Amino acid sequence: MSSISIFEIFKIGVGPSSSHTLGPWNAALDFVDDIVDDFDRIQIQLFGSLSKTGKGHASDAALILGLSGYNYKTIEVDEIENIINEIRRNHSIVIKSKKVNFSYEEDLIFEPVTHSLHPNTLIISIFKDNIGLKSSVYASVGGGFIEKEGTTHKKLDTKDLPYPIDRGKDILKYSDDLECSISEVVIKNELSINTKVKVKAQIDELIDAMIESVYRGCNQEGILPGGLNVKRRAKSMHYQLTKKEDFSSKEEWIDNVRTCNKGFNEVNKWVSCFALAVNEENAAMSRVVTAPTNGAAGVIPAVMLYYYFFCDYKERNELRKFLLTAGEIGSLFKKGATISAAVGGCQAEIGVSSAMAAAGLTEVTGGSPRQVLMAAEIAMEHHLGLTCDPVGGLVQVPCIERNAMGAIKAITASNLALSSDPKSAKVDIDTIIKTMWNTAQEMNGKYKETSEGGLAFNLPVLYPEC
């Protein structure tokens, strides 16, 4: 298996979906990078889940922005709507400084059939005088990862790492041999790829981006886009907890949260508020951290801030250990099962993120490596079979609330593991990953991000913006 850095699991990007937004965006950037022909028209075909829920997940917007050369890490998110509207109005798009014909209605084709490559498949083609010059087929396989048909993407091979990890038992072997924590094993691998300064800077960038998404979401109100008319709730919940309407800075906000009531009910509400804040930002096509997907982006920040505000937090390095550990758990699921809802349902998104968060929290609250893996296993065990049924193809109902539930389950899983002897556990992390993959393969296709089953089927409504 190929090794996965935690910086592939965690990515700063734009919502609402890693598989349906970031993946297509990455595919468009890759396609543009390879163009050498003189062409006058471009066409995009979306298949399967990308077709059925693509508009609600902003796949169309992501592709247009990627073809235009915008990077999701740096684009001004408040300008996205204006950029898309101008391209649709002018029936043209600028690619590599060249203006070419592009009709949103005619050149962006939603094919309801599923492509043989993957449930999330798209084809980008260019033409000159109506003669096809080049076509590339991409699969968006979850978490923003893409695979290009006919191409072997270069990945870091396991032999390049001092401590290659494919399964949970590998983690335990290294932690036992080195007599160290899981985060210490992970950092040794990361330092074989990049310098200490760069690794530290990358982790801190992720931490800051997560806190920023929570802060921004807690201070935004209104109706989320897409036509479902879902009202943002994080700000009103935030006000109930703080009794304060506005903050002059993020630092003032942090100080205020620290001084709030720390009773059980209040802390529980704060965790839910943090999760809602992130995923309301995600639904509004704002910037979040893929963890390991956009649809599940609120779980890890919520649990990380639970530790930061309400536990025995002492220093920044603890948050780094949290993400190092969580990221490695995410890579186990990526390699041994899936993190794509179109392949495995929501257990592959909220389930994995909850397992990651449970592991990270257990690491920083003094758990042993075996307790860390036990916490991850417990969290996933109680998400098995969770379906992906976004109403109207939007990452809103039930997705936003599911992040709050995943965060609370992660904290519970951590507490159970910390209070238990892993030697008595009946199920280990490798078994639960295998079981999740078996469940994913046997799950009915209508529950895999198609909006054809579950709540999406039982709440038929019209979406004028989709």
Image (cartoon, rainbow, N blue to C red):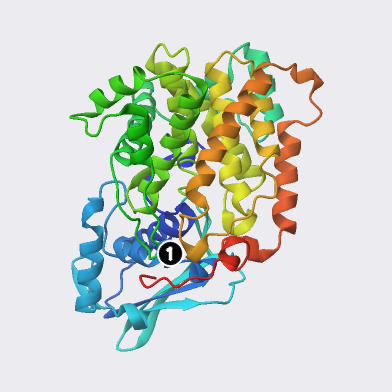
Could you say where residue 299 lies in the image, as x and y percent from the top left?
50, 37
Mark 1 crowd level (few <14, some 14–19, many ≥20, 10 Å Cα): many
Which residue is tagged 1? 56
Q: Quarter-wise, where is residue 261 in the image?
A: top left
Residue 92 in the image, given as x and y percentages of width and height: 23, 76
Question: Is residue 190 or residue 304 the one in the foreground?
Answer: 304
Please state the total of marks drawn on the protein image: 1
Element carrying mark 1: loop
The residue sitting at 27% across, 56% down in the picture is 70
The answer to whether any part of residue 44 appears in the image is yes
Q: Which of the 4 quarters of the picture holds residue 141? A: bottom right
Residue at 75% of width from left, 58% of height from top? 442
Say if 365 sits above or below 2 in the image.
above
Q: Is residue 443 left or right of residue 225?
A: right
Where, by quadrant of the figure, is residue 199 drawn? top left
Q: Position of residue 386 (x, y in %)?
A: 65, 50
Say above or below: 13 vs 209. Answer: below
**Residue at point 20% right, 29% down?**
249
**Does residue 158 appear anywhere in the picture?**
no
Question: Which amino acid, mark 1?
Answer: Gly
Which residue is rendered at x = 49% and y = 40% of the image?
Answer: 9
In this rendering, position of residue 293 left or right of residue 346: left
